[in-house]
Amino acid sequence: MFSTVYDVIVVGGGHAGSEAAAASANMGAHTLLITMSLQNIAQMSCNPAMGGIAKGQIIREIDALGGYSGVVTDKTAIQFKMLNKSKGPAMWSPRAQSDRMRFAECWRLMLEQTSKLDFYQDSVNGLLFEGDKIVGVKTSLGIEIKAKAVIITAGTFLNGLIHIGDKSFGGGRAGEKASTGITEDLVKVGFEAGRMKTGTPPRVDGRSLDYSKMIEQPGDENPEKFSYLATTKPLEIQRSCYMTYTSLEVHEVLREGFDRSPMFNGRIQSIGPRYCPSIEDKIDRFASKTRHQIFVEPEGWDTVEVYVNGFSTSLPEDIQDKALRKVAGFENVKFFRFGYAIEYDYFPPTQLKHSLETKRIKNLYFAGQINGTTGYEEAAAQGLMAGINAALNIQGKEPFVLKRDEAYIGVLIDDLITKGTEEPYRMFTSRAEYRTLLRQDNADLRLTPMAYKLGMVSKERMDRVVEKQNKTDLFVKFLLETSVLPEEINPILEANDSAKIDQSMKMFKIAARPQLNFTDLRKLAKVEAFVKENNIDREVEEQTEIHVKYAGYIDKERNQADKVNRLENVSIPSNFDYSKVKSLSIEARQKLTKIQPITISQASRISGVSPSDISVLLVYMGR
């Protein structure tokens, strides 16, 4: 049946697995996606949304690299918002509410239209090794399928255990069985495994809610979109979300169930996500707070199912019901399903290379929650990179690795493999030291040229990026060279509470003023004529405005990144014997031996490795 040796097998069809399968196939590798349910490909297991703070930047980066997440999100969105718009552009983060059912359907249809990609529905419960290489997988039906490379994207399914109150049962998510065998095979060959926890809130019937008691949360008046491709369009109509609050009365009801909560009675011992805590955890940790926000999010255009964001819980179902009825607007709530917590196996990511290939077993890649991350976006980014690198590996080519100053994806992977994680890792803008460089608006300029060299995007797409860059440069040049007279600009300056000028001044200096935006500048006939003559669109205008207003910050970060990158060029030989370097601290010696950094720069980011340890290494290596 499977006599063919596949180039790449992807185990798991979630967000990581879907991106991995698409990337691998688009790189020319004959790929097989094995999933326990073909109906649930790219299922939104938790909230029906993509993007958000830092996560939106990741989706833009995935799109710029030729991944599918941005396109699927645009095609199935029901609301779009640009978060943090009142802050600087480094903080702007796109987010979209999605139609859950259409999202999964769109993903499957796009994958089915991807050449060189095959599908098989079964559970993988064994891995096939030959020495220090993986050579295939074994399914629950006893079928052995051979491959040159394997990517494991098992999500929360590895020995998954679901908790609701004092009830526990095996499962990868609600209604789906757990996966067994993979963890055991990996531990046998020397991998270190651990347990993590995550949770999800109840889903309820929107017809039973009273929205008049809630605060409406509409989408943006002029919505944008995720993908840089012209094949998707911004939304013309949107669905609103709503916001309400818990209360002290709600908190008291929830506390009634604490003695039956698996979080507090010791049945759950693994660590959950710090930045997406359960409602009982929030009440316990922030006892002084009298209320917490609850976001009421529709699951799609037509369904009445609603996601109760902010009420993630594993409390007993009777407590969930009693407490939620005390929330304004939920007095007559009807449950579709109760919230639950889930524990699952993960593998500390310090066991990986930057390519996401494991250090211990050749041609084996991990992506997604198996690496200790949380979130669709983080998983999808890892899947994309694992898919690209698995294909490059079997083609005998060097791995594709993004640096910290090139992409949030680079920050994500470097953090995981250099620092590891003992709790579910979530991306934030604060994790990126070069976030002014890594904006959501310029992901195509940063990454599409790399994707074009890899063969992940078309020439037409590359040409669009070149055109965008050329037009931006042209606009900046126009502003640098064009002067404006006081009588032309002063009425505009005065209207915006900006100091008037008394002599001719270059447009660039005027445009850099924080009180002005480019809508104001276009009131000048010469600017409007330039925009129309050169067919300047909104994207180019935004790029130009950011460049003008933040040039100093951008240049400063670029210089800092260049200094750090000099240490990226100082390679450390593989299997370097740190025990010979007696001047290193004991902790540094232990951490460096375990993680095996490939450059001095990576070594400097390892917790427990001090600047003096780095100086010792540089001296030892003759630098």
Image (cartoon, rainbow, N blue to C red):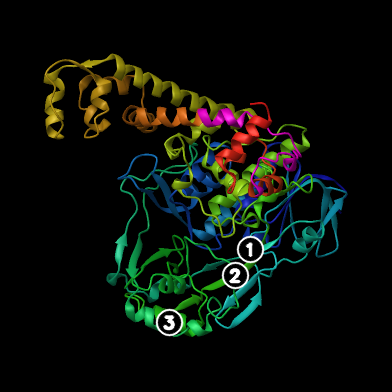
| Distance from Cα at disc 1 to Cα at disc 2 | 8 Å
Can you give x and y, in whole percent of width and height, for residue 77 in the image?
A: 45, 52
- The residue carrying pointer 3 sits among few (fewer than 14), some (14 to 19) or many (20 or more) residues within 10 Å by Cα, namely some
Q: Which of these two is toward me, 206 or 472?
A: 472
- Is mark 1 in CB contact (under 8 Å) with mark 2? yes
Q: In which quarter of the view is residue 301 placed?
A: bottom left
The residue tagged 3 is 255
Can you give x and y, in whole percent of width and height, for residue 24 in the image?
A: 69, 42
In reply to whether residue 569 is colored magenta, the answer given is yes
Can you give x and y, in whole percent of width and height, for residue 3 in the image?
A: 88, 49
Can you name the residue that lies furthest to the front here? 583
Observer-side mark, 3 or 1, equals 3
Asked which secondary structure carries label 1, the reply is loop
Observer-side mark, 3 or 2, equals 3
Q: Which of these two is toward me, 107 or 302?
A: 107
Q: Which of these two is toward me, 392 or 248?
A: 248
Q: Which residues are magenta?
A: 563-586
- The residue carrying pointer 2 sits among few (fewer than 14), some (14 to 19) or many (20 or more) residues within 10 Å by Cα, namely many
The residue tagged 1 is 156
Can you give x and y, in whole percent of width and height, for residue 490 in the image?
A: 12, 25
Left/right of residue 331 with respect to residue 57 in the rendered view: left
* Residue at the image point whose x is 54% and y is 73% from the top: 340
Q: In which quarter of the view is residue 269 placed?
A: bottom right
Residue 71 visible in the shown view: yes
Q: Earlier in the sequence, mark 1 or mark 2?
A: 1
| Residue type, numbered disc 3 | Arg
The residue tagged 2 is 342
In reply to whether residue 44 is colored magenta, the answer given is no
Residue 113 visible in the shown view: no
| Distance from Cα at disc 3 to Cα at disc 2 | 21 Å
* Residue at the image point whose x is 53% and y is 48% from the top: 72
| Residue type, numbered disc 1 | Thr
